[in-house]
Image (cartoon, rainbow, N blue to C red):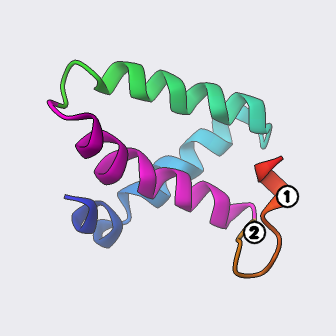
Amino acid sequence: MARGVIKTGLGERLAYYFISIFRKRTLGIAYSIVASETILAPITPLNTARAGAIINPIVQAISCSFKSSPEDNTQSKIGT
């Protein structure tokens, strides 16, 4: 399922949607991720499936859109 979310670009589209709603405020984006976890919790049977297949690609796309990556040593842009 995670491959499908990444391959179709759903994670990236949702990330840009969250950013457009909360206008690049990291606290607002964190609240939106928590809200989406809360909404998806009754639907998804396993916590690992929800975290690994649905939420993880969205969070990775958000961090890439802010150009925050541990490989580039810029993880503190959005991580702090």
The answer to whether residue 65 is left or right of residue 37 is right
Foreground of the two, 65 or 70: 70
Q: Main secondary structure of the magenta part?
A: helix
> Is label 1 in contact with label 2 (beta carbons under 8 Å)?
yes
Q: How many marks?
A: 2
Does residue 43 show up magenta in the picture? no
Give the SS element for disc 1: helix
Q: Which residues are magenta?
A: 45-66
Which residue occupies the foreground of this view, 62 or 76? 76
Question: In the image, residue 62 lies at what x, y percent?
Answer: 61, 55
Which residue is found at the position 54% from the left and 50% from the top?
A: 15
Please provide percent x and percent y for residue 50: 29, 40
* Residue tagged 1: 77
Q: Is residue 35 above or below residue 74?
A: above
Depth check, mark 1 against mark 2: the one in front is 1
Rendered image quadrant of residue 2: bottom left
Which numbered dot is residue 67? Answer: 2
